[in-house]
Amino acid sequence: MKAFLMYRDRDFDPQQLLARRERELRPRNPDPALSLQQFLPWNEEALSQDLGLDVLLNTMALGDTFLFEVAKVALLSGLTDLETIIYRQHVFSDCVKNPQIVRDIYQLVAEAIERERKNYWSFWDRYPAAIVSGAVGVLEMFVGMLKRLRGIADQHRDDFQSEGFSRLFATLREELSDEYFALIEKQLKQLKFRAGVLISVELGKGNKGKNYALRKPHEDNRSWIARLLGPKPPSYTFQLAPRDEAGAQALAALKDRGLNFVANAVAQSAAHIHSFFQMLRTELAFYIGCLNLNAQLGQMGEPTCLPFPARAGERKLSFSGLYDVSLALSMGQRVVGNDLRADHKDLVIITGANTGGKSTFLRSIGLAHLMMQAGMFVAAESLQGSVSSGIFTHFKREEDATMEKGKLDEELSRMSAIARELAPNCVLLCNESFASTNEREGSEIARQIV
């Protein structure tokens, strides 16, 4: 099964993010090569510093590291496909209408993953019998969680209208039917082998066993009285001596060979369900973060809206009441918004007195672009903007503490790195660039770059 809450046709799949989380939860299999940085743009550090992203992300996460990581990847992996942006907006609208239901689903999925972690078992366990026993226990727990998830889908399917949630609930109802659960529970009961393990084997060269196969036990359809008092079927038995350790080990080895294929199958089944829960949790985490942020801004009385995205080549940028969301969150109160009509403009120059709000205005535009292209709401009364193929910032910095280079050299170095990455339809926000030199030289450098 797939969640499809972030994309219409594929998973939100930062495998590195998921693997990193698994590494934290399962330290038995460390992988030092894992790095979330691989899924972030090269200028992530500059964007975070210049736009105050950490304030925004901390509000979305509310202290949850996993929410923070998912929100960061989603926010900095901007979409350029308008249909996907609108697809996420519709899913988020459902979340706003049904916040408690969405949070309940998220908690259920997180609980399933946590319980599976506490009952840790491994593909790489040495003994197939141990793999089967551990995987069956995990599958029983997962089946219970899937039943609860299907119950939520049955109860609240009419409360959600977005394509994402409607398809998720329909999939849960179709693939997790009562008949399916009954079949799975019956098979899991059989895999506990309470009546012993029935294995067939052929004799090969030197009377060595080959073609080991696990067999389904014969069903005894007689009544319980007949089974208790009636004659037992004929059988051959072999009984080990009480202290025959070698014999016990030999029988255990035979049992493991017969269970080998079953061990692989049940382990893969448990891993498949775990993967579904993990992906559902990851995709829901983004919307939980959006709900957290939206609730905080609502308590402050700040306006929010779903933007109208336009194609990159259309050069649209118009808004009313746009404000710096990170500033508002830092101050804990409403801040003054701004209006702008800059459609079909390639260059906008903002001037004004010191402490007049120029930097704040630039940050509000940068944050709005990131939030819009993540499929989120924006911090404004209304906004229409063209999607960009990249967001770049060149804000002034403090003096280099290491004294390895001068301030102008540092500014030119950062601008050179940006110039190498710029492409058509990118957005470049410059805040007092090259103010470290005199007006004539700074103006000439800026003119040539622009």
Image (cartoon, rainbow, N blue to C red):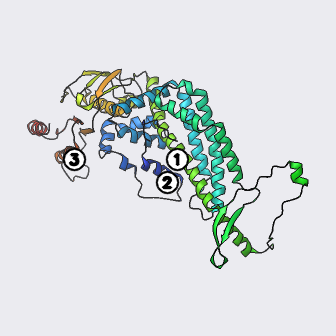
Residue under pointer 3: 417
Q: Which is nearer the eye, 301 or 426?
A: 426
Q: Residue at x 52, y 47 (%)?
A: 275
Query: x and y percent of residue 123 in the render?
Result: 56, 58
Name the residue type under label 2: Arg
- Drawn side of residue 41 relative to residue 231, left or right: left
Amino acid type, callout 1 = Ser
Q: Determine whether 86 is above or below 34 in the image.
A: above
- The front one of 34 and 206 is 206
The alpha-carbon separation of the residues under discs 1 and 3 comes to 38 Å
| Label 2 secondary element | helix
- Name the quarter where the C terminus is drawn: top left
Q: Which residue is mark 1?
A: 275
Q: Residue at x 37, y 37 (%)?
A: 75
In the rendering, at what x and y percent does residue 235 appear?
81, 65
Q: Position of residue 394 (x, y in %)?
A: 23, 39
Calculate the distance from the C-alpha at mark 1 to the C-alpha at mark 2.
Answer: 15 Å
- Foreground pick, 54 / 119: 119
Instruction: Read off the residue under disc 2.
Output: 23
Q: In the rendered structure, are the residues bearing label 1 and label 3 in contact, judged by CB atoms less than 8 Å apart?
A: no
Whole-percent x and y of residue 302?
40, 22
For residue 121, which quarter of the picture?
A: bottom right
Label 2 Cα neighbours within 10 Å, binned few <14 / some 14-19 / many ≥20: some
**Nearer the camera: disc 1 or disc 2:** 1
In the rendered view, tell whether residue 187 sits above or below residue 77.
Answer: below
Q: Say whether residue 443 is visible.
A: yes
Say which amino acid is labelled 3.
Answer: Ala
Distance, label 3 to label 2, CA atoms, is: 33 Å
Residue at 20 percent of width and 35 percent of height: 432
Query: Considering only vertical position in the picture, is 2 above or below 137?
Result: above
